[in-house]
Amino acid sequence: QARFVRPSACSAAGRRLGRPFRRGLSSGALFRPPRAQVGKHGAMARLPFETSRVKLIFAEDDFVFQEIAKPAILRAGIPDESVFMAENGEEALEFLVQLQSGDINDPIVMLLDMRMPTMDGDTAAKKVHELQTAGKLKREPYLVCCSAGFTQVVFGGEDGSDRTFHLTMPKPFSNNEVALVLENAAKWWGPGSVSTPVAARGGGGAGKDFDKAAVCTIIVDHEPICRMALSTALSVQGIDEDKVVMCDGPDEVADALKEAQATPGAPLMLVLAQSQWADAVADFGSLANKPFLVCSSVADGGPSSERFDAVLPSGFQQSDMKDLLEKFRTWWARCP
């Protein structure tokens, strides 16, 4: 399990701003702020917004959401060493204060969860405004609220969102939402600034971008509770529940697959509770949008059939679901 070093434990000589969010990593990333650039007349001059220069502070106390969010942030183009993980608003503010000694050409974006122990995101954002008003921030952050109460990105004050923030983003979020945050942060930063679109950064092999939020999933199981369990577990891993189709049996698979063909290029996953139901897919021959075929309810997670791309054990856990999606990503990268 990843460990975090609290800002208060940092040394003066070389402050260790949180360990990179990665399992099994033994050493933390050292933050060495570059020298601030000075203009012709001694005034501080800043360059246009660049995603690669962004310093992103992410405050979230839930470990599951941390695991989902960090890869999405990296896929949006933020360097690993520029992501600072905080477990509450107080730690996020400590990171912000530490980053004031850095280069003014490096934008700061703060993603703050609305509900956290010690200090919630709303209180932290108000503290930021207090520091701004007092003239204590040389580098002001772009403030983003992360809330499970919203289903889409909204701007400060819209649709009941908090005016304290520049933008409110739903959680869990994908790299697409992070990219939208960066695009708006670039507009806020100043004219001539751009953030690199997600599509331009590439994804898997053959230049394809695997976006979990874009995955279309068909779950086939006679048991409603099993279908719901699979859907919920997938949503925790970043799959959009609105793109999940549930079928009671193989007879409904044909229509579901036909509907999925209406979204060309989108990753498609078909989860079958029984291995013999794979015949329902075989009958279709060549599909334009080929599904990643999964058999669920497999005893002990052992292989069920060579016809499947992956299997899920009957008593699956989130780690199994995470491994499944990694296999899906690899399979998707190889697909023509």
Image (spheres, rainbow, N blue to C red):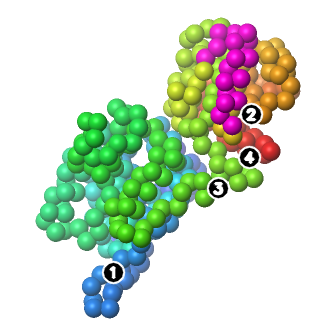
Mark positioned earlier in the residue sequence (2 or 3): 3
C-alpha gap between disc 3 and disc 4: 11 Å
247 falls in the magenta region:
yes
**Residue highlighted by disc 1:** 45
C-alpha gap between disc 2 and disc 3: 20 Å
**Residue highlighted by disc 4:** 333
Q: Residue at x 54, y 57 (%)?
A: 197
Mark positioned earlier in the residue sequence (1 or 4): 1
Using residue 104 as the reference point, say whether residue 73 is left or right of it: right
Query: Which residues are the magenta region?
Result: 246-264
Q: Which mark is residue 74?
A: none
Above or below: residue 268 compared with residue 180 = above
Which residue type carries mark 1?
Ala
Mark positioned earlier in the residue sequence (1 or 2): 1
Q: Residue at x 27, y 85 (%)?
A: 43
**Front residue of 257 and 174:** 257
**Front residue of 97 and 140:** 140
Q: Check whether the beta carbons of the residues at disc 1 and disc 3 lie within 8 A of each other.
A: no
Q: Position of residue 214 (x, y in %)?
A: 59, 37
Mark positioned earlier in the residue sequence (3 or 4): 3
Q: Check whether the beta carbons of the residues at disc 1 and disc 4 lie within 8 A of each other.
A: no
Answer with the quarter of the image where residue 227 lies: top right
Q: Tell me if mark 1 has few (under 14), some (14-19) or many (20+) residues whose alpha carbon lies within 10 angstroms of its own.
A: few
**Residue highlighted by disc 3:** 202
Answer with the quarter of the image where residue 252 lies: top right
